[in-house]
Image: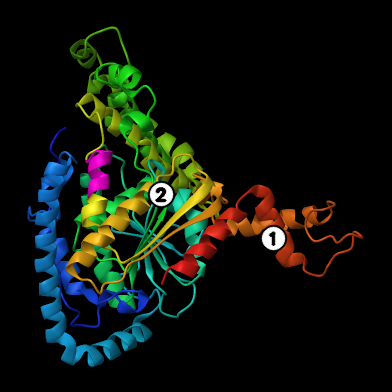
Amino acid sequence: MHQPIFKSLAVVVVVLRTANSFQVVSGFGFGGTTRASSTAYSVAANNHHNGLSRIRTNTRLFESSSSSSSSSAASEWMENERRLEEEMDREDSAASSTTASTTTATAEKPSSSTGSSSPSITNANADASADCRWEELHGNYILRPPSDAPPRALLHFLGGALLGAAPQLSYRYLLERLSRRGYLVVATPYQLSFDHLKTCDEIVGRFELVAPDLAKQYGAVPVVGVGHSCGSLLHMLITSLFPDTPRAANALLSYNNPSVADAVPLFEEAVVPLFKDERRNGSGLMKAMIGVAREQFNGKVPSDEALLHLLQSLPTPFPKEVTESILTPSLVTLPAPIRESLTNLLAEPTYNALSNNKLNIPSLLLQSLDVTQQIPKLIDEVQEGARDFVPTPDAMSAAARRAYRCRRTLLLQFENDSLDDSESLEGYLKEAESVMKMKRPMITIDLQRKVLAGNHLTPLLGPSGGESWGEVLEESLGGVLDLVPNVGNNDDDGEMDGSEGRDSAKAVRETLGYEQVERVVDELALSLP
C-alpha cells in the first residue's frame, strides 16, 4: 500500500464570536454547542496552502485491525479526543457571557443580506443549462432555496463513484427538490481515486473556499453532510478524520464500502494486466480526445497542440520516439486563414445555436467530460501500482468505530440494493457511540436506519434537466395518462375526480419511475434539521 500524500490544514476549533458563521447547533439532539466561525474557515483555507495536515488521527488507524493494535490506537485517539473536548468546554464557558448578544446578531444578519445580490456570491459562471438558480463558485455548485427566508440548513452533497464528478447533472432533480424544501445546497464535485483520503482532503479544501462567502450572506445555519454511495463513504471519513469540518448531522444514502476486487470483477486477473502497460492501456489517447472535445464544446476549432497530441497518442506499431519524430508540429499546423474560416463559418455558429436555448447543450457536454476524464486518471493509478483503496475497507470500518463523532446520523437504504452496507455501518457507529459515552456519559447520539422502496440508483432517477424538465413531462404526459383507464385521475366510472393537476403529475412520476425520489426527499426533509 502506498502512503498517501496529504495537502494541508490546521485543526481549528473556535467558539462563535461573530455573526458571520456556520454553526453546529444544540437544538437538533446534541448535548453541547460547537461552532466554527467564518474566521476559522478563512484560517483553514490559508493553512490548506501551507503544507500542514488536516488528518486528525495517526496512521495506525489504517494498519491492521487486529485486537493488539486496535486497543492502542483507540486509546490514543480517546486521549486526543479528551483534550479536544476539554478545550471546547473551556471556550464554551468563556464565551457563555456573550452568547445571547451573539445569537441576536446572527439572527439579524441574514435579513440584511439574504438573496443573490451579494457580490461575493454572484458568479459569471452560473449554470443556465436547465435552471438559472444553479451557480458555480470555487468549483462547487450552489443551489439556493427559492424563498427569501433563511435556509433550514446547508446540505453539503457528495455523489457516488464517477457520477460524483458532475452532481449538478446526475443528481439534479434530487437536489432541486431538496432546495424547494428550504435547503441551501452545496454540491462539491470530486474526481474518483483509489486514495480516498486524498479525495476527502480535496473535497474539504474546495468546500472551505465557498463557506466564508455563504456564511457572510446567510449567517449561522447548521451544516449537514448528505452523500450517496461512495459519497456517503467519503462523508463518513470526513466526519471521522477531519475535525475542522463540524456537521450538525449526516444523511448517508446507500452507504457502500467495497474492496476494489468486489467493486471491479476480475480486477487482478484482467484489469491490472490490461492497464499496467502504459503503451497499451489507452490512457494517453483518452486524455487527448477529451482535450480536443473540450475545445470543440467551447466553440473553438481544436488548437494545433491538441491535434498534434491526439495524433501522437494514436496506437501505432512503431516506438513512441519514431512516432513523435514523424508527427512534428510543422506537419499538423492548420493555416490561419483556414482556421479562421472554420471558426467563423462552423464552430462559432454551431456553438451559439446550441447555447442560445434553455438546454445550453455545450455546457452539459462540457460538464459530462468531468465524468469521462476520471477513466484515464484511474487507469494511470493502476499503471502506477494501485491495487486497493486507501484506506482499505477494513481500515475505513475501524475509522468509523473509533473516530466517528457526528451526533445525528440518518442511514437511508433501499429494499432492492445488494450493494448497500448500511447495516454494517450502523453496528460500527453504535461502537463509536460507546467510545464517546466513555468520555462524556451524558452525551446523546441520534442514529437511525430507514429502508425505502427502490434500489441503488434511485437517487439518480428523475429528468436529467431537473425540475424544469419534470414540469414539462408532467404537463405534456399528464393529460395523456388521464385518458388511460386505471391511470391518472379517472374514477371507476371513467369520470375525472377533480384533482387533475395534482394526481396527473404524480401519475407521470410513478410511470417514469422518479416518484421514488420524492419519497427520498420527504424522508430527508422529515429527518434533517
| Magenta stretch holds residue 396 | yes
Give the mark nearest the N terminus, 1 or 2: 2
Q: Which class describes the residues within 10 Å of circle 2: few (<14), some (14-19), or many (20+)? A: few
Horizontal relation, residue 376 to residue 244: left or right: right
Callout 1: SS = helix
From the viewer's side, name the closer residue of 360 and 11: 11
Can residue 370 be spotted in the picture?
yes
- In this view, 180 is above or below 136: below
Q: How is the image coloured?
A: rainbow
Give the x, y percent position of residue 191. Answer: 31, 43
Q: Which residue is mark 2?
A: 423
| Magenta stretch holds residue 52 | no
Can residue 48 be spotted in the picture?
no
Q: Which residue is mark 1?
A: 505
* Total labels drawn: 2
Give the x, y percent position of residue 487. Answer: 79, 54
- In this view, 338 is above or below 176: above
Q: Which class describes the residues within 10 Å of circle 1: few (<14), some (14-19), or many (20+)? A: many
**Quadrant where the N terminus is found in the figure:** top left
Q: Which residues are magenta?
A: 391-398
From the viewer's side, name the closer residue of 162 and 314: 162
Callout 2: SS = helix
- In this view, 327 is above or below 227: above
Which amino acid does the dot numbered 2 rest on? Glu
Main secondary structure type of the part rendered in magenta: helix
Q: Residue at x 11, y 79 (%)?
A: 90
Spatial CA distance of label 1 from label 2 is 35 Å
Q: Nearer the viewer, mark 1 or mark 2?
A: 2
Q: Residue at x 46, y 47 (%)?
A: 364
Horizontal relation, residue 240 to residue 466: left or right: left
Give the x, y percent position of residue 357. Answer: 55, 53
From the viewer's side, name the closer residue of 229 and 384: 229
